[in-house]
Amino acid sequence: MSPIAIVAIAVGGTLLFGGALTWFLIWNNRSYNAEKNAAMQRLNEQAPQRGWTYEERNDSYVEVYNNQQAHTPDRLLVQAPPKAHAAHDVITGTHRGRPFLAARFSVYQSPDMRHDGKFLDVAPVLVRTPALRPMLSVRRAFAVQTAINTGLGLTYKTGHQEFDKQFEVDGEDEQFARAVLHPALIEFLLADPRQPRGFWLLGGHLDVLHEVGDHRDPDNLVPALDLRCDILDRIPQQVWG
């Protein structure tokens, strides 16, 4: 094969690849915009029916996020807590009788040994608890990690063998943690098909560790709120007294 033919094939292949990549990027962008528009249409239709309020930006809610982070115990911090400076796509209202806040916060994460300081977006779905109580974190972990941390006294044990194998429990008050982790909640966390990776009570709100997607879409937000309410439903009422 002549050098000219080789060059022609190479150039042709590059052009074909470039064209395919350009087409994919255009298609992907159109697909994203279509999904976003459909989500916003559903939100615009359902928000009035549900009594929700949507605001494209309202930085007054930054204080809610920052106040929540301020309740993290010092012993659990390896760096300063993240600090929000803007709140976008803010949705507020009630779901199953519980006030909630869902928003995309622009956050600054202070530097640590792993990385320099950085800006990032976080999108919590916070459901207000009946009262402000001690911080509590419940999260799934590898069995080996759980066993090591249990041996070091870094996680509470509930006495439920399977739960203690799959989850780590940490917080400010062990007695409160035991009261929250009622057998009904333990069984729910082990068996629920949505498989939440954990939850935390912090600063008067509950949030859950799981994939939500675009929180502006009621098709995503309603199931996320249901999961949080399902967890709160299984926490004995007396713990809020």
Image (cartoon, helix red, strand yellow):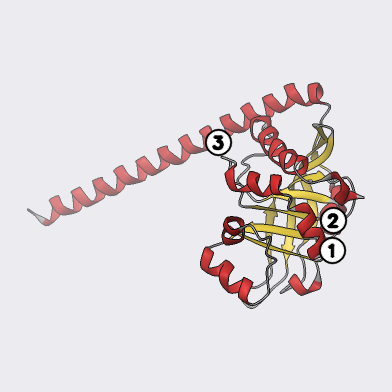
* Mark 3 neighbour density, 10 Å: few (under 14) some (14–19) many (20 or more): few
Residues tagged 3 and 2 counted as in contact (Cβ below 8 A): no
- Mark 1 = which residue? 70
Of tags 3 and 1, which is closer to the observer? 1
User: Of marks 1 and 2, which one's residue comes earlier in the chain?
Assistant: 1
Question: Mark 2 = which residue?
Answer: 203
Horizontal and vertical percent position of residue 133: 87, 56
Which three-letter amino acid code belongs to the residue tagged 2?
A: Gly
The Cα–Cα distance between marks 3 and 1, rounded to whole angstroms, is 35 Å
> Residue 61, position in %: x, y?
85, 48
| Quadrant of the rendered image containing residue 73 | bottom right
Secondary structure of residue under mark 1: helix
Q: Please give the residue where the numbered disc 3 appears in the rendered image.
A: 32
Q: Position of 27 compared to 1: left or right? A: right
In this view of the protein, can residue 236 be seen by the observer? yes
Residue 203, position in %: x, y?
Answer: 85, 56
Disc 1 from disc 2: Cα separation: 8 Å
Among the 4 quarters of the image, the one containing residue 237? top right
- At 84% from the left edge and 62% from the top edge, which residue is drawn? 71
Question: Element type at marker 2?
Answer: loop
Q: Which mark is residue 14?
A: none
Taking the view exactly as shown, the residue that stands out farthest to the right is 241
Name the residue rendered at 8%, 54% in the picture.
Answer: 2
Mark 3 or mark 2: name the one nearer the start of the chain: 3
| SS at circle 3 | helix
